[in-house]
Image: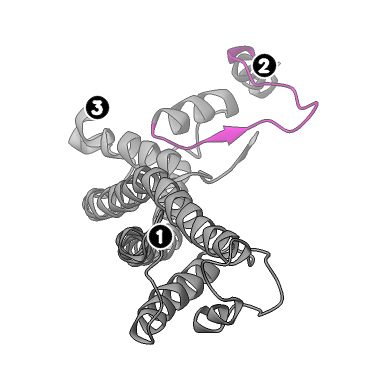
């Protein structure tokens, strides 16, 4: 007899429960291999599980689609921060601005390199430094930067900051929905196993191939081991032949 194995994916779990639920329609009341209690429990658990799997799937799809837009938002603010620093440094080279002005942005006084902008956190830090620093520099009598202006940079910075917060909220929703699905999996697996035990016990008197067919029809999932001979109807015939008197 091949061995049985519980479903491995959420979709497989739901398919197994759906097959189990079809028992009530396909069998006469007096020939049900599963009790009404278990069938009703399977109906309830299937609805709950399907709902949470859907919520998880939807929350992930929303995050995934918004993340495409978020990557463009990140690219925009990275370009504006980089260009602002580069243009300011070029203005220093042209003696339009003083090198001491770098201190307002917390930039190294003796370096013209653009700081590392590879992470979201670095963009948050440097965007705020440039915005606050430019305001303070202008307040102290400095001429405003142009192309890009700090106003344009601030617009992209605020879009980036708000989008990041939204994506973090969406990620939290995904995590919460995933936790609920994970918690339900153990409950669903335990229920499926209990129902399978009942089905196999109900058909335990049948010969191997007939028992396999009957249980499989009710949703029990079987797998053959490597090299194991598959059961056929002839196995049942051979069994009866061996049991018949000489």
At label 1, counting other C-alpha atoms closer than 10 Å, the crowd grade (few under 14, some 14-19, many 20 or more) is some
Element marked by disc 3: helix
Farthest residue toward the bottom?
Answer: 140
Residue drawn at the location 62% of the way across and 16% of the way down:
232
Residue at left offset 59%, top offset 29%: 208
Colour mapping: one colour
Whether label 3 touches label 2, CB < 8 Å: no
Viewer can see residue 1: no
Q: Pointer 1: what residue?
A: 178
Q: Nearer the viewer, residue 203 or 56?
A: 56
Q: Which residues are magenta?
A: 218-234
Report if the CB atoms under discs 2 and 1 are less than 8 Å apart. Answer: no
Q: Nearer the viewer, residue 239 or 160?
A: 160
Q: Name the element at disc 1.
A: helix
Secondary structure mainly formed by the magenta segment: loop
Which residue occupies the foreground of this view, 76 or 187? 76
Which of pointers 3 and 1 lies earlier in the amino acid sequence? 3
Which marked residue is nearer to the observer: mark 2 or mark 1?
Answer: 1
* Quadrant location, the N terminus: top right
Residue 207, located in which quarter of the rendered image? top right
| Real-space CA distance between mark 3 and mark 2, rounded to the nearest whole angstrom | 30 Å
Q: From the viewer's perspective, is 168 left or right of 112?
A: left
Image position, residue 117 (x, y; %): 58, 62
User: At 31% from the left edge and 37% from the top edge, which residue is drawn?
Assistant: 18
Residue 216 % position (x, y): 46, 30
Mark 2 lies on residue: 238
């Amino acid at each position: 007899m091949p061995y049985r194995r519980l479903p491995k994916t959420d979709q497989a779990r739901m398919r197994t429960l759906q097959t189990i639920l079809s028992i009530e329609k396909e069998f006469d009341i007096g020939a049900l291999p599963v009790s009404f209690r278990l069938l009703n429990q399977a109906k309830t658990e299937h609805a709950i599980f399907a709902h949470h799997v859907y919520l998880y799937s939807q929350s992930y799809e929303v995050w995934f689609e918004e993340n495409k837009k978020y990557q463009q938002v990140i690219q925009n603010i990275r370009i504006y921060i980089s260009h602002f620093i580069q243009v300011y440094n070029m203005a220093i080279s042209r003696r339009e601005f003083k090198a001491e002005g770098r201190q307002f942005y917390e930039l190294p006084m003796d370096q013209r390199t653009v700081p590392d902008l590879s992470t979201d956190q670095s963009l948050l830090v440097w965007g705020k430094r440039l915005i606050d620093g430019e305001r303070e520099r202008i307040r102290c009598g400095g001429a405003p930067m142009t192309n890009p202006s700090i106003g344009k940079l601030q617009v992209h910075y605020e879009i980036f900051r708000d989008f990041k917060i939204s994506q973090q909220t969406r990620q939290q929703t995904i995590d919460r929905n995933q936790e609920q699905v994970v918690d339900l999996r153990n409950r669903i697996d335990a229920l499926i196993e209990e129902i399978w035990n009942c089905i196999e016990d109900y058909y335990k008197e049948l010969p191997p191939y007939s028992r396999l067919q009957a249980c499989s029809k009710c949703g029990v999932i079987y797998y053959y081991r490597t090299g194991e001979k598959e059961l056929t109807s002839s196995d049942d015939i051979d069994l009866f032949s061996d049991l018949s008197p000489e």
